Image (cartoon, helix red, strand yellow):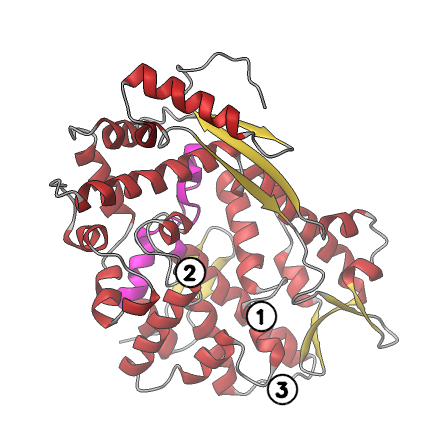
Amino acid sequence: MNKLKILNDPIYGFITIPNSLIFDLIQHRYFQRLRRITQMGMSYLVYPGAHHTRFHHAIGCVHLMQQTVKVLRFKGVSINDDEETALYAAILLHDIGHGPFSHAMEHSIVNNISHEKISSLFMAKLNTEFNGNLTLAIQIFKGEYHRKFMNQLISGQLDMDRADYLKRDSFYTGVAEGNINSERLITMLNVNNDELVVEEKGIYSVEKFLIARRLMYWQVYLHKTGIVAEQLLIRVLKRAKELQAKGEALEASKALLYFLKNDIDISNFDDKTLNIFAQLDDVDIISAMKHWLHHDDFVLSELCQMILNRQLLKIKVKKKPIKIKSIQKHIDQVATNHKLSESEAAYFVFSGQMSNQAYELKEKRITIQHKTGKLQDIVKASDQLNLKALSKPVTKYYICYPKADTKETYDS
């Protein structure tokens, strides 16, 4: 069987699968599940085109890594065949631990287990199945390999993950501000003392990359309607777990019921749990909500209809934290209007915060290499004054509440 297949991608055109190991990993059921996990969670409720998947993204990352290896080798950076394959495997599998609708699941069906940790567990399991052929990939993924630049290509501030998702998410949402020139960025990469650097002539491409990232976060990833939808989904699953604990019968897939009935944290996330997690995807959640839409519990059914019919809560975004008395006022209003307890009303009234920091000065910096050989952080090397501002986190605060229950006047 010819394993050197070619895929057609709307972003990059034809993508080649570099070798049989990568082909076999793509064919594995753990990876095929990513076809059923949306890349951008609930963002399709804001941007109708945002239905692309984690599968698309991971394949795109492998393509960009192939381009990077080619560029670095051309510039005299030594990358042997084992390292090359390990880089492809690590970037292919970097998101394999994502649950349904991406980040929402980290706070609902499992207790504070990051998708990176679950990715590590999947990679360890796959390494056993593939006779240890992923050992080097796992070392690079975890930052344990002595060649630091390889981990920076997987998980840094200018990595292949960001280089793909900004361009891809920009394409599928239609938000042109995120359309970075990933090919030029890659062409400007080099390695100095085993650390990733960008050649001086690539400085403007990096500036565009950081500004694009900031704009994509405010316009897309932290879009207020997307925030509401994701928070509602978290609360749907929280309420389902609460009802399940009280002995209520809920219709759902076997895999989803397992996570509703059991409190799963890192201490009991064993091989059995991993295999059940591997059966979960967006379909389980949508299907369950369609059942729960008709449940006797008002809170659960109302939360489900809000998401399925896109009748979302109202959201107000402020520069200062929301006052407790304002939250309480809305909770009391909802409790009175719908004859709910205070704890039930709190499912429909809540506050939170969102933070945007396009560039982190302290960790995994982007280094510019001048023609003289001098190395400098992008913020100091750039004449773009905004870059320093981009390194400071900007935090906004929000409150969500039902539209029909409150007058437009709002006391922050």
**Residue at the farthest right position:** 372
Q: Which residues are magenta?
A: 28-54
| First in sequence: mark 3 vs mark 1 | 3
Measured from the top left, where is residue 112 in percent x and y?
Answer: 39, 57
Measured from the top left, where is residue 399 in percent x and y?
Answer: 50, 30
> Where does label 1 land, which residue?
153
Report if the CB atoms under discs 3 and 1 are less than 8 Å apart.
Answer: no
Question: SS of the residue at dot 1?
Answer: helix
Mark 3 crowd level (few <14, some 14–19, many ≥20, 10 Å Cα): few
Distance from disc 2 to disc 1, alpha carbons, whole Å, reads 20 Å
Residue beneath the point at 48% across and 60% down: 60
- Circle nearer the viewer, 3 or 2: 2
Q: Is residue 214 visible?
A: yes
Label at residue 114: 2
Q: Is residue 85 visible?
A: no
| First in sequence: mark 2 vs mark 1 | 2
Which amino acid is tagged 3? Ser
Tell me: residue 85, above or below residue 275: below
Distance from disc 3 to disc 1, alpha carbons, whole Å, reads 15 Å
